[in-house]
Image (cartoon, rainbow, N blue to C red):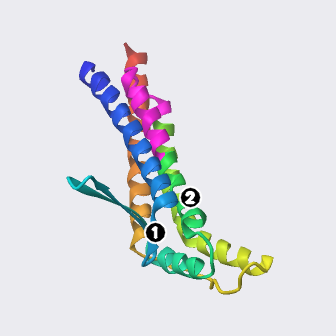
Amino acid sequence: MDRIVSLSKWIKLLIVFLALLQVSSYCGTMMFGEFQAGEYVLTIDWWGWFSSYLAVDFGSPWQALAQRLYDAGFHPGFILGSVEILPYLFIYYFLYQLFGLYQQGQVFTTANFRCLSHIALVFLAWILLSLFYPMLVASTLHFSGISSAVPMYFSLGSQELKYALFGMVFYCVAWVMKHATELQEEVELTI
């Protein structure tokens, strides 16, 4: 149990580091990067020693929409990228909570089940976001009269299938944890 507690502390730090790294690289790329071939790219030269390459790329249906938004004079990174980063932030948050419970020595609790099932729900909501957000953007631009140059997009591809797979895996793990919690409670009652 001590190993789980100490490892959870390090994993929580890693989650915070990854979340900050993703948000800062996203913001830097959106503010200082250039839009090229459906993605935002930022190349940083570190005084000739080495170069860094940061990119905010969109999946295939979103990449076509990003190009159309850019051609119509919009900033696709803020319209599409700011929404695309939200599921990552929710997943980081729930993982941080989960490993916080592990750090407290709470391995088989209903709170763990909730964290894991929330992550599963984020993946399932991500599917809906991926499918319908491009249509929402296009219809909002059309009906508001801002631009009619952005067509409606609907695409179901491998990215959405990955989200479904991850969501099902997390949901299954959540139910296994719930069952383990019930078994542990029964053992404690019989003692």
Is 109 included in the stretch rendered in magenta? yes
Q: Is residue 46 above or below residue 77?
A: above
Where on the picture, by quarter, is residue 68? bottom right
At 42% from the left edge and 78% from the top edge, which residue is drawn?
Answer: 37
Could you give the CA–CA distance between mark 1 and mark 2, rounded to whole angstroms?
A: 16 Å
The residue shown at (45%, 48%) is: 24
Region in magenta: 91-111
Image quadrant of residue 17? Answer: top left
In this orientation, which residue lies closer to the viewer: 19 or 91? 19
Q: Which mark sits nearer the N-terminus, 1 or 2?
A: 1
Answer with the quarter of the image where residue 157 lies.
bottom left
Look at the numbered disc 2 and give the secondary structure of its residue.
helix
Label annotation for residue 82: 2
Whether residue 58 is visible: no
Total residue callouts: 2
> What residue is shown at x 50% (from left), y 53% (from top)?
27
Which residue is labeled 1 in the image? 34
* Quadrant placement of the N terminus: top left
- Counting from the top left corner in percent of width and height, residue 128 is at 57, 65
Relative height, residue 158 to residue 53 (above, below) = below
Answer with left or right where residue 182 lies relative to residue 125. Answer: left
Question: Where in the figure is residue 114, as x and y percent of width and height?
Answer: 51, 38
